[in-house]
Image (cartoon, rainbow, N blue to C red):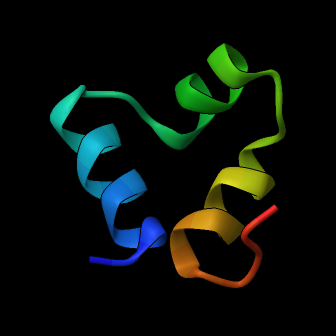
Amino acid sequence: MALSEKLYTLRRKSGLSQEQLAERLGVSRQAISKWESGVSQS
């Protein structure tokens, strides 16, 4: 399973939106979206 798939799966299991996860990690929602789509791994 790729990192993008793991991130998506764990976020959904935790019941978090991309916005909520972004706030917790101190990054933008767009960063979460890119990570989950596999566009960016950083």
Q: In this view, does 11 lie to the left or right of 3?
A: left
Q: Is residue 4 left or right of residue 20?
A: left
Residue furthest left as drawn: 13
Query: Quick check: 39 above or below 36?
Result: below
Q: Give the residue at x 45% y 67%.
A: 3
Q: Is residue 25 left or right of residue 5?
A: right
Question: What is the x, y in percent for residue 39?
Answer: 71, 84
Question: What is the x, y in percent for residue 22?
Answer: 68, 31
Residue furthest top as drawn: 24
Question: What is the x, y in percent for residue 6?
Answer: 32, 59
Residue 18 sits in quarter: top right
Q: Give the residue at x 77% y 75%.
A: 40
Q: Give the residue at x 70% y 23%.
A: 25
Query: Quick check: 19 above or below 23?
Result: below
**Quadrant containing the N terminus in the rendered view:** bottom left
Q: Is residue 3 left or right of residue 33?
A: left
**Quadrant containing the C terminus in the rendered view:** bottom right
Question: What is the x, y in percent for residue 14?
Answer: 24, 26
Q: Give the residue at x 55% y 79%.
A: 37
Query: Quick check: 29 above or below 42?
Result: above
